[in-house]
Image (cartoon, helix red, strand yellow):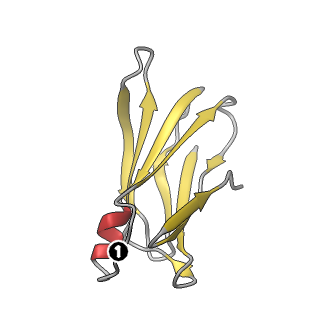
Amino acid sequence: MITTHVLDTSRGKPAPAVPVVLERQMAGGEWRVIGRGETDADGRLKSLTSEVDPGIYRLTFDTGTYFRERHVENFYPEATIVFEVRDAAQHYHVPLLLSPFGYSTYRGS
């Protein structure tokens, strides 16, 4: 399972309504969309995908839309996180800590 959540560190609160796309890298190197959604009121997205195979995955967060809708100037129109799933039996939680001029991530639990 792959899940995420977004925290707006400039506000000290979860970031709701952030569009997110999950892709998997295929054998030829191309990316295939396997999930998409929008963070809930608590900044979480629990329904990206439940079936995961070993491989390389990419999460893309539409941070430009999030900040534009709040009338906040920002530098990054999107944040992209590429990560590897080695053990498909594990839960992969990939949070995004976001501010208008920076972001960071980590493997959560």
**Position of residue 56 measured from the top left corner of the image (x, y, whole percent):** 54, 30
Residue 96 visible to the viewer:
no
Callout 1 secondary element:
helix
Q: Is residue 77 left or right of residue 80?
A: left
Q: Is residue 9 above or below residue 51?
A: below
The one nearer the camera, 13 or 105, is 105
Residue 75: image location, x then y, percent = 39, 66
Which residue is pictured at 58% across the width and 83% down the height? 12
Q: Is residue 104 left or right of residue 101?
A: right
Q: Residues within 10 Å of mark 1 (few under 14, many from 20)?
A: many
Counting every numbered tag in the picture gives 1
Residue at 41% from the left image edge and 20% from the top image edge: 29
Which residue position is annotated with label 1? 67
x%, y% of residue 41? Answer: 45, 77
Q: Position of residue 1 (x, y in %)?
A: 58, 43
Tell me, yes or no, if residue 76 can be seen here: yes
Q: 96 or 101: nearer the eye?
A: 101
Name the quarter where the C terminus is drawn: bottom right
Q: Residue at x 52, y 85 (%)?
A: 11
Decide: is 69 above or below 104.
Answer: below
Residue drawn at (40%, 14%), measured in percent from left and top? 28
Disc 1 marks a residue whose amino acid type is Phe
Q: Is residue 98 left or right of residue 108?
A: left
